[in-house]
Amino acid sequence: MGFRLTLKELIRSRRAIRRYTKEPVPHELIRDLLETALWSPSAHNRQPWRMAVLTEFADKAQLANAMGERLRRDRSADNDPTPAIERDVQRSYERITGAPVVIVVCLSMADMDVYADARRNSAEKTMAVQSVAMAAQSLWLLAHDAGLGCCWLCAPLFVPELVRETLGLSADWEPQGLMTLGWPAQEKHKTREPLEQKVKFLGI
């Protein structure tokens, strides 16, 4: 970027970038981003996040093909038009394989508390999800600060077992999303709705 953004500027200028140059991202930079992101807050300080980093085209293509085939099957079962399905599958493939780096963001309940009732176990799972989301947001902002583009893809939520099996991840790793990462090949501009539409100040 050529200059250092303030935290406020960093948050306000972050965008979902889906197109990248072919320039690789140095391994040392990826490690540094992850090591810093994993200092994010977590419930009970259990750090339930798990990250699988894909940089080889073969690995990204294997994942993209497996997810694409499941997407094709699911949408076909919904009786969606074939051309629309194929466009969706192709777009998904290009987004995954076109990124120099793909990070599969997962959570693990292995170190979280276990209760005797479903209500508290559900809350514990939500706390783990929130913790992983905070780490992912930290990673995104750190990537943006380094001049990288990033995008969050929710598709693994629909096929967590498929993603885990395709990549040979541990049984307790629950895929939550994919983060694509690379040097940006596009610029995006967004707006936000007024504060008053989203926030209520009580007692004022």
Image (cartoon, grey):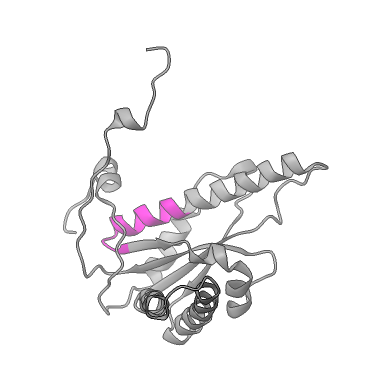
The picture places residue 170, in percent across and down from the top left corner, at: 67, 70
- Highlighted range, magenta: 136-149
Task: Locate residue 127 relative to residue 192 in the image: left or right.
Answer: right
Q: Quadrant of the N terminus?
A: bottom left
Residue 88, quarter of picture: bottom left
- In depth, the one of 13 and 126 nearer the eye is 126
Farthest left residue?
A: 2
The picture places residue 187, in percent across and down from the top left corner, at: 19, 62
Task: Locate residue 187 relative to residue 78 in the image: left or right.
Answer: left
Does 201 sit above or below residue 8?
Answer: above
Residue 117, quarter of picture: top right
SS majority, magenta: helix
- In depth, the one of 104 and 53 nearer the eye is 104
- Reply yes or no: does residue 74 show up in magenta: no
Q: Name which residue lies at 48% across and 48% down.
A: 134
The picture places residue 99, in percent across and down from the top left corner, at: 35, 74
Q: Name which residue lies at 42% across and 12% down.
A: 203
Count of numbered tags: 0
- Reply yes or no: does residue 143 show up in magenta: yes
Residue 70, quarter of picture: bottom right
Does 38 sit above or below residue 97?
Answer: above
The picture places residue 53, in percent across and down from the top left corner, at: 48, 72
